[in-house]
Image (cartoon, rainbow, N blue to C red):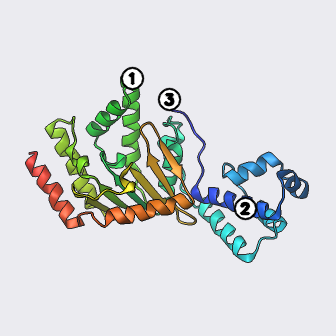
Amino acid sequence: MPTRQATTSAARKELGDLLRRLRGRRGLTGRQVAEATGIDPGTLSRYEKGSRRIEPPTVGALLDLYDADPSARETAAALWEADSAVKARPAWWRRGFTLPEDFGQYLADEQEARRIRSVELHLPPGRLQTEDCATAVIAGMRPDLTRREVTELVDLRMRRQVDTLSAEQDILLGPSVLALPGLAPGAARRQIERLLEAAQQPGITLRVLPPDLPYHPGLAAPFVLMDPPVGGACVWVELMDRSIRLDDATVKRYQAAFAAIAAHAHTVPATLDHLTRLITERT
């Protein structure tokens, strides 16, 4: 069921990870840090998890205690600045709109990202779905939901599309994405028109993958790579009933997978021609 969720920026999470690693290198426990700084272990844990904002004087006190080198101090300062620069939640989100499991963090990462790369194997990206397509997708994938709950999630998807992303987007579409089974001819044509419109927008690179694409492990499930302004990227992998967030070494494997899959994609002009032809065929 939808729930309200606490979220954190990628920069804040990475700053917490940095502080945790520095503490570990010094061999200090949370209790020892509390005795030296007055920060109770519970608060320190929330700082290290990125679930609580940390102010510069506190960052400085911890860096001093951990005897951090200049490079670590510079990184910490950059991460704190990046976290401070993260945009506020959209107005509809701040009003407390309930979100599916893990989706709150996905939205937070998406808002913050400077670059987004995605492989969509069977469905148009949520941000590019028409209302008819979103209704068919959500109702088909979530038969446990009532009609009202489906309508609420479709509304969430449509509201999300209103918020413009600052990130550059590189989207790879599997050939089956454009089949659009279950949609009436008119609805299918409008969905392809929506994709064509997006493909012509600045900052969006949309390419279609060929039907004879060679097998690659990266094709096992749709995924989205998000690069924040500062710090390491994360990847979201879509499962049947939820998405999971991965980071650290796993991201490198997905970055390599995206590059390998993208090497087989049609060019942007060829993709535009293909979408235009499909619209003509469905008219």
Res 85 label: none
Q: Nearer the viewer, mark 1 or mark 2?
A: 2
Disc nearer the start of the sequence (1/2): 2
**What is the secondary structure assignment of the residue under circle 3?**
loop
Q: How far apart are marks 2 and 3 (CA)?
A: 35 Å
Which residue is labeled 3 in the image?
1
Contact (Cβ within 8 Å) of mark 1 with mark 2? no
Give the residue drawn at x 57%, y 60%: 248
Q: Name the residue under label 1.
A: 146
Q: What residue type is labelled 2?
A: Arg
Badge 1 marks a residue whose secondary structure is loop
**Is 141 rendered above or below residue 224?**
above
Whichever of labels 2 and 3 marks the residue nearer the N terminus, that label is 3
The mark found on residue 21 in the picture is 2
Name the residue type under label 1.
Thr
Q: How crowded is mark 2: few (under 14 residues within 10 Å), some or many (20 or more)?
A: some
| In-image side of 51 versus 149 (left or right) | right
Q: Can residue 168 be seen in this view?
A: no
Q: Position of residue 209 (x, y in %)?
A: 26, 58
At label 1, counting other C-alpha atoms closer than 10 Å, the crowd grade (few under 14, some 14-19, many 20 or more) is few
Q: Distance between the residues labelled 1 and 2?
A: 46 Å
Within-10-Å neighbours for mark 3: few <14, some 14–19, many 20+: few
Q: Can residue 131 be seen in this view?
A: yes
- Left of 243 or right of it: where is 202? left
- The amino acid sitting under disc 3 is Met
Task: Where is residue 197? Give x, y as percent.
Answer: 24, 55
Position of 163 compared to 51: left or right? Answer: left
The CA span between labels 3 and 1 is 11 Å
Residue at image x 53%, y 65%?
229
